[in-house]
Amino acid sequence: MSDIVIETRGLTKTFGTQRALDGVDLKVSRGAIGLLGPNGAGKSTFMKCLLQLLPISSGSAQLLGREVGAEGRDIRKRVGYSPEQNCHIPGMVGCEYVTYCAQLSGLPFQAARQRAHEMLDFVGMGQERYRKIDTYSTGMKQRLKLSQAIVHDPELVFLDEPTNGLDPKGQEQILELVSDLWRRYGITVVLSSHLLHDVERICEQIIIIARGRVLVHDTLENLKARRRGSAEVVVADRHGEVLAAFQRRQWPCELLSNGRLKVEHQQASLNPLISLLDELRIPPLEIIPSPNALEETFVQALEMSSN
Amino acid sequence: MPLVDTHYQHWDGIHCGLWTRRWVIASNGLTACLRNKFLRNVVVATWSLSLAMVGALFVIGQLLVPDSLLVRWVSTLNTDLQGFANYLMNWLKDHPEISVRTTQDVLFYYFAILLMPFSIFAVGMAIPFLVTRDLASNAIIIYSSKAITRGDYLLGKFASVFGLLSLLWFGPVCAAWFFGNLLAPDWRFFWHARIPLFHVAVFGIVAMTTLSILALGVSSVSQKDKSTVAFWLVWWLLGFPLANIAAHTRPWLAHLSFAYDINQIALATFGLGKDLRIAQDNIPILGMMLRNIPQRTMDSFNNPPLFGSLVALALMLGAAGLVIHKRVRP
């Protein structure tokens, strides 16, 4: 099994004179992948081109080692997709809908029905699965979309803004489920979102797209390493004492409203910071390295692209 | 401990083939149509008419059996009637090709045409379940993201409406043919009635294919149920006044009605003009009655404007294909 799940060469998609994707070259390996970008950046278009929901204008793409365009059916048998907008089939009840989606992916009826109930259990839907989808709340519809995307046990699943319109608790639950898909069950997840926090929490690889171009493609770890030199420190008390010590070292610092101390220690590793706290005999409760690395990278990438 | 295992489990079964997936779309579409109570009533109505047709064929068949209940009953009425019945029986025995083939050809033509308005009306009711609602709810995206193509989706939807028409139209006609001949006094009825069955099959397949594609086209016109249903019904109903206007002004106007064009194909397929001529010349009593048909009507039976109808239907199918191509996409 190849480690590369997505490979594109000069992938371009135009709508009239507008270039939604402009020569995208990518090689993405298995894992949890975050697709970031502002609204209208081309994230959804990128996913739709890979799934052949939109025809590619020029360039080529491979998904799971197969050429997109030539082997569409076979590719989609191994790929799941949860679109951003609601797209249920009117008049159907939840479990019937997921069963139908499984059958469309090639599962025999008995297996499809069993899988549908398993997936609805997995996403935490109870008896409401026997209700018509038209009566579902936004949260239920998001869960249903997720279950239909994974009901056929795909190797790769595309999730387009899966937490849109959810309350914080609902967001938390959906992110937990999505996180489990890769970490526990080995399904590669491509999560498209404009919410940095969601992506940072789940994803190991980050792709930042803006104006139809890939600005950044790297692991989250590497992005954080690039932004080394800042940290957030959580201490139980003696905040003033710690701040004073930082200032003596001429490290810019501040006390955040959440009680954490933000410090720009400007060092490649956290060791000097830990040594200082040790000298002060103040045990840190938590040290978060490069807490805003993704946000800063994102903003910087956008600025570069607009320049 | 939870009652159900909520962990994700992998599936390593064998996938179904492409035709199974197309069949799933077709059966789902047909099931959605038949959830409509009104449509179910139309199905019951057409099958009731089929039963009546079987009854009519049974009566005709009984006339060939000398000691049948029907003949015995007729003979109790009047000796003259008994004589007539015997004459008719002997004639039918001597001319089975005409008595069975021609009679059934004429009967099945009228039966197929009788069921056509039911079918067109039912298709109108089913139109929202074809493409319209999938466009409105974006379900077309879900279909496109599964292991099927747009062609598979359309083929499945086509099979849905074709299946509905088979249930409403072709099924009752074929069942009437089968049971009508099964209840006949002689197995040779099946053989003599092979040509009417062939005509039914040819006309049925052509008409149902045409109607199914037109219905898919109309269903793709809009995302609103009311618009597509109204489009279909208005187009169909406008055909009646158009045919009348065309008869007195410009004949080509009639070809704007798909029902008229399908009717012309039926006339040409069944060869109704030829059948009526044979009946007029050979069948006792009925032939005499048929001689009263006006010459102008006979002319229209003898020479239906088949070419014009085929061209008109081809243009309509082309337009439907264009609409489907433009509209049915994620």
Image (cartoon, coloured by chain):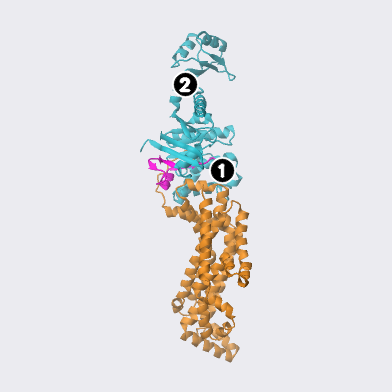
Chain colours: A cyan, B orange
Chain of the residue under the numbered disc 2 shown in the image: A
> In this rendering, is residue B145 above or below B121?
above
Describe residue B296's horizontal placement relative to residue A68 as left or right. right
Q: How far across and how far down the image is residue A269, in percent?
A: 44, 17
Chain of the residue under the numbered disc 1 shown in the image: A
Q: How far across and how far down the image is residue B238, in percent?
A: 62, 64
Q: How far across and how far down the image is residue A99, in percent?
A: 50, 48
Which numbered disc, 2 or 1, marks the residue that appears first in the sequence? 1
Describe residue A6's horizontal placement relative to residue A121 as left or right. left
Task: Please state which of residues A190 and A124 is positioned toward the viewer in this rendering.
Answer: A190
Q: Residues within 10 Å of mark 1 (few under 14, many from 20)?
A: some
- The numbered mark at residue A86 is 1
Q: Secondary structure at mark 2?
A: loop
Q: Label 2 amino acid? A: Arg
Describe residue B287's horizontal placement relative to residue A50 as left or right. right
Region in magenta: A58-87
- The numbered mark at residue A255 is none
> Is residue A71 one of those drawn in magenta?
yes
Q: Are marks 2 and 1 in contact (CB under 8 Å)?
A: no
Q: Secondary structure at mark 1?
A: loop
User: Which residue is label 2 attached to?
Assistant: A227
- Which is closer to the viewer, label 2 or label 1? 2
Q: Residue at x 55, y 70 (%)?
A: B263
